[in-house]
Amino acid sequence: MPYTYIIYSHSADRFYIGSTADDLQQRIRKHNSHHRGFTARANDWGLVYCEKFESIQQARSRERQIKAWKNRKRIEVLCGFSKP
């Protein structure tokens, strides 16, 4: 099942918005493993939001929509996120 998801790193104090065609938990494990890219900066990424879709095209469309907001506060509201 395709997903759009948002993960958060406490150490980096950053959100990452992405989509995946199937195994969401496996995708999050990849974000926390040794790799290159934006999420390589930290290894404490945790899922704070996800949506299921019927197709990967719908999931990617939603990902682009959220990224287009360019507004951290709006993303925090969507996630129901509040820092301790």
Image: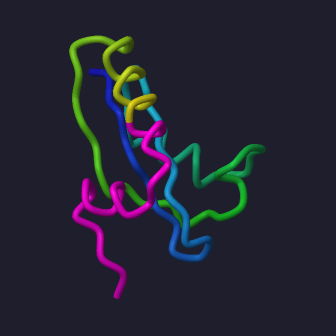
Residue interval drawn in magenta: 66-84
Q: Position of residue 18 (x, y in %)?
A: 47, 37
Closest to the observer: 12 or 44?
A: 12
- Residue 15 in sight from this viewpoint: yes
Q: Is residue 74 magenta?
A: yes
Magenta stretch encompasses residue 5: no
Q: Quadrant of the C terminus?
A: bottom left
Q: Residue at horizontal 49%, vertical 57%?
A: 15
Q: Is residue 69 above or below residue 2?
A: below
Numbered disc total = 0
Measuring from the top left, give residue 46's x and y in whole percent.
42, 60
Q: Looking at the picture, how far across and down is residue 14, in whole percent? A: 55, 64
**29 or 50, which lies in front?**
50
Image colouring = rainbow
Magenta stretch mostly in which secondary structure? Answer: helix
Above or below, 56 against 63 in this view is: above
41 left or right of 25?
right
9 horizontally vs 65: left or right = right
Question: On the image, which quarter does residue 36 sit in?
Answer: top right
| Residue at the spot 34% in from the left edge and 23% down from the top edge | 59
